[in-house]
Amino acid sequence: GSNSESKRGALIVLEGLDRSGKTSQSSKLLTYLEGLGHSAELWRFPDRSTNVGQMISMYLSNKSQLDDHTIHLLFSANRWEKRSLMETKLKTGTTLIVDRYSYSGVAFSSAKGLDLEWCKAPEIGLLSPDLVLYLDIQPEKAAERGGYGGERYEQLEFQKKVAKCYQGLHDASWKIIDACQPIEDIEKQLQEIVLDCVLTCQKGKPLSNLWS
Ligand code: Z5A
């Protein structure tokens, strides 16, 4: 409508394997949107700043052991604790660029062998992204980028399983981007798609919940 209060922000998620370039591209997108005068913020999951986030961080750095189901639910809880703030931000016109979201939650846990529907269940009712940018890279190529540290999931064989699990999660909100192109080429491609999404949301596309 013409009322500026009704212009909501867009929920834009970046997904992909470790080293696919999510972090680099998220910050470039933020700079781009802010440069155009849009209100935008960069978020990431896990959000390691909360109490739940600290438990997740300990687990990822191998400082604690947790049952696979338990850590799955903690990742989900970490998104739930940010849900109402997320909704407020979007409704008051701020676009959120989010580095990893529920798809990471489901892909990484189901790659361990947990039941897919069980993995999706705690994500139901979280906000549904308006756009998912999947940075597509072969696990071998990602590993070559280096910087695989000591974190729990940073192993080639496991990343291959995660890549397969991601493939089962694509829906209409996904755009698959070839993450092996030069950084600047990917940046240009993402800018176009993201701006289009931001404008569509401003025109009144309703918010919805996962998984619908
Ligand atoms: N996890 C989960 O299990 N359940 C959940 O619900 C959630 C997450 C939310 C922590 O994530 C782990 O938690 C993660 C999934 C799991 N485990 N893994 N794997 P994290 O976000 O803290 O860590 P990460 O996603 O693995 O981030 P990252 O390692 O920082 O990767 P990235 O953000 O995708 O890539 P980058 O930092 O932008 O780039 C990596 C390097 O590649 C860097 O040197 C760049 O300069 C280079 N790069 C980037 N783009 C290019 C191109 N186009 N060409 C060449 N080189 C490039």
Image (spheres, grey):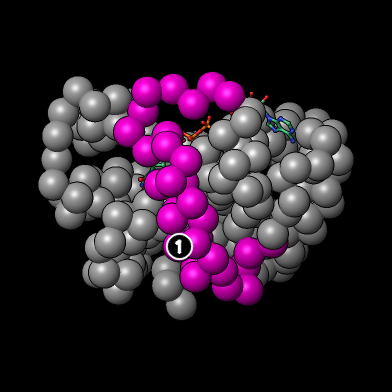
Q: Is residue 204 left or right of residue 67?
A: right
* 137 up-or-down from 52: above or below: below
Relative image position of residue 19 (x, y in whole percent): 58, 34
Relative image position of residue 159 (x, y in whole percent): 46, 46
Relative image position of residue 16 (x, y in whole percent): 56, 48
Q: For this rendering, which residue is in front, 181 or 70?
A: 181
Categorize mark 1 by other alpha carbons within 10 Å: few (<14), some (14-19), many (20+): many
Residue at image position (69%, 61%) is 175
Q: Is residue 155 magenta?
A: yes
Which image quadrant: the N terminus? bottom right
Residue type pointed to by label 1: Cys
Q: Which residue is mark 1?
A: 165
Q: For this rendering, which residue is in front, 165 or 87?
A: 165
Residue sitting farthest toward the bottom: 212
Residue at image position (51%, 55%) is 163
Find the magenta span and give its range: 146-175
Relative image position of residue 39 (x, y in whole percent): 66, 38
